[in-house]
Amino acid sequence: MSDRLLNQFTNVAKKALEASKYSTTLGMNMAEDARRLSRAEMNEEDFVRKYQGMVQKEFGKKMELAGIEETKDGPKWGMVIDLRKCVGCDTCTVSCKAENLTPPGISYNVVLVEEKGIFPNVSRTNTPRPCMQCDKPPCVTVCPVRATYKSGDGIVVQDNDRCIGCRYCMVACPYGARSFDFGDSYEGEMLGYGAMTAPDHGMDRGERKKGHSPIGTVRKCTFCFHRLQRGEEPACVETCVGDARYFGDLNDPNSVVSKMASEARAFRMKEEYGTEPRVYYLR
């Protein structure tokens, strides 16, 4: 898939950063070095040593090591998306918004459409893009307050109560999978929207209002963490009308996702970034 389609989201992320009260230059520099760390061109100790003083000055916080470590026991959740079966219906996008009650301008799941050729010789590829739940996530490395972290089951978690809304993680993510919650609402067209509880972090935050998380923080897909806790699949997987999505434990060599991820037609987005995504695609 053309990087051009993904870059539209990274450009949005940069504009969101420029609108914040924090240093854009520091954010862009940290994001670039966080990506170098993912590519093993830098280690985390050097990253923290380089930026600790600047983070202290900008945020008044002491920067700690992120300490991303892989847990050997338990499941490692992953997803496989068969591009030959995706019909581009956007059901995943809609079901994700309904499940996670994301506000206007925020969709954890989007479907990128690329058309090639001239009529009648035209081909179309639909590429769904959730969070990649990377094993070497630059979004985690760059966070100055460690509000985002890699959990033992492979999911990159966002702690919205710790997030200060600096948006550095947004420009560090190569996939544009993070969004800033500016506080927009569907209340005008959906009566009672603000009173509904967003379940994506398993917390009842009560009425949605300014000054209260998650407004003013960065939001992202968590593979429907709250549904996994109930033994259910992510909403996008359960509702896919083309059965194009598969979800399971990549640690289990006998699982469907493990076998699919090993197929010759399996690939991951932007592998050259070294982020080790847990979302695989089948050509």
Image (cartoon, helix red, strand yellow):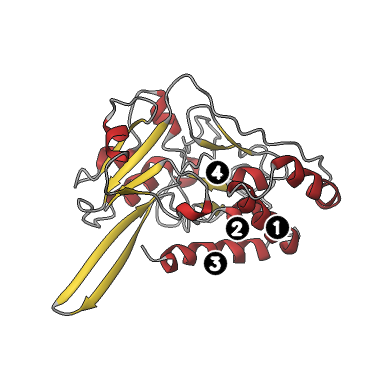
Residue at point 27% right, 38% down?
260
Query: As drawn, is 80 to the left or to the right of 140?
Result: left
Q: Name the residue tied to disc 4.
A: 208
Marks 4 and 2, how far apart in space?
Answer: 26 Å
- What label does residue 11 carry, if any? 3
Dot 4 or dot 2, earlier in sequence: 2
Secondary structure under the numbered disc 3 in the rendered image:
helix
Going by the numbered disc 3, the residue's amino acid type is: Asn
Residue depth check, mark 3 versus mark 4: number of the one nearer the observer: 3
Residue depth check, mark 1 versus mark 4: number of the one nearer the observer: 1
Marks 3 and 4, how far apart in space?
Answer: 28 Å
Dot 3 or dot 2, earlier in sequence: 3
Image quadrant for the N terminus?
Answer: bottom left
Q: Name the residue tied to disc 2.
A: 171
- Of residue 5 and residue 39, the one placed in the foreground of this image is 39
- Of residue 51 and residue 266, the one placed in the foreground of this image is 266
Dot 3 or dot 1, earlier in sequence: 3
